[in-house]
Amino acid sequence: MKRLLITGAGGNLGKLARARLGHMADILRLSDIGEMAPAAGPHEEVVPCDLGDEAAVMELVADCDAILHLGGVSVERPWKDIQNANITGVYNLYEAARAHGMPRIFFATSNHTIGYYTQDKVLTVQDPVKPDGLYGVSKCFGEAMASLYHSKFGQETALIRIGSCFEKPVDRRMMATWLSPDDFIRLVECVFRAPMLGCPVIWGVSNNDEGWWDTSTARLIGWRPQDNSETYRAEIEAAQPCPPADAPESRYQGGKFTAEPIHK
């Protein structure tokens, strides 16, 4: 493609995408709310943007062939912060995409859309949402917005419910939710090269032995996660005692997010 827009390019996933997706487009347009380091390199454009600014987002999306949407608030925060980036910002993004030829969107949604399900459940993407906080609610909104724009206008979006994308799992819950960086990059590649996408919900999780999610919809885009958290089990179990059975991280798929207060 000519130009790939990466929102949230200053975050952990954004930095990973910036480092490893240059082969996918002639130009990476990198955006975040603040300044990003380093400055734009060859075949890069750095464009700071507040997703809550409708005019700025309209300009940001212009001339882009695809959007890797990682931007917005990614943890529990006061509602005004979540609303600006994850509610108003999502509306602005979809309106800008509609105005500029509807480039395909990879939308980073979250496992926190279903965080209040207990860990004895295996979920499909058809199961009702059950968010574990205001952040999770905002991602449910984003999924609904993507569905609306697909049904009404034909806008294609992959709704990727990302588990826990780190270099390796860091706690026992991540044995089930871990998405390796390599699998994440392969997933992005599959989303943008699929001949037909629609608006599927896909669990963003590696091929872990332990897991709570039916990942069969990944076959729609030809994605086969290859990494497995089991590689790290001995390390995790040696480093951390098993939490009590009634602790949030033992009971709920959203883990400690279910115990977060409503932030003011």
Image (cartoon, rainbow, N blue to C red):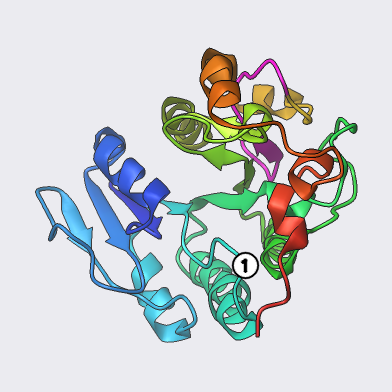
Q: Is residue 186 above or below residue 245?
A: above
In the image: residue 204, left or right of residue 118: left
Give the residue drawn at x 56%, y 22%.
238
SS majority, magenta:
loop
Is residue 133 covered in magenta? no
Q: Residue furthest left?
A: 42
In the image: residue 9, left or right of residue 251: left
Q: Viewer-proximal residue, 239 or 169?
A: 239
Residue type at tag 1: Glu
Q: Is residue 209 above or below residue 220?
A: above
**In this rendering, does residue 195 appear at all?**
no
**Residue 117 on image: x %, y %:** 87, 45
Give the residue drawn at x 12%, y 61%.
39
Q: Viewer-proximal residue, 184 or 58?
A: 184
Q: Quadrant of the N terminus?
A: top left
Q: Viewer-proximal residue, 15 or 149?
A: 15
Task: Write down the region rendered in magenta.
Answer: 196-210
**Residue 193 on image: x %, y %:** 47, 31
Mark 1: few/some/many CA within 10 Å (<14, 14-19, 20+): some
**Residue identified by numbered label 1:** 76
In the image: residue 92, left or right of residue 12: right
Q: Viewer-proximal residue, 53 or 163?
A: 163
**Residue 166 on image: x %, y %:** 46, 37
**In this rendering, does residue 158 appear at all?**
yes
Q: Is residue 108 above or below residue 207?
A: below
Residue 47 occupies quadrant: bottom left
Is residue 209 covered in magenta? yes
Q: Quadrant of the C terminus?
A: bottom right
Give the residue drawn at x 25%, y 40%.
19
Q: Secondary structure at mark 1?
A: loop
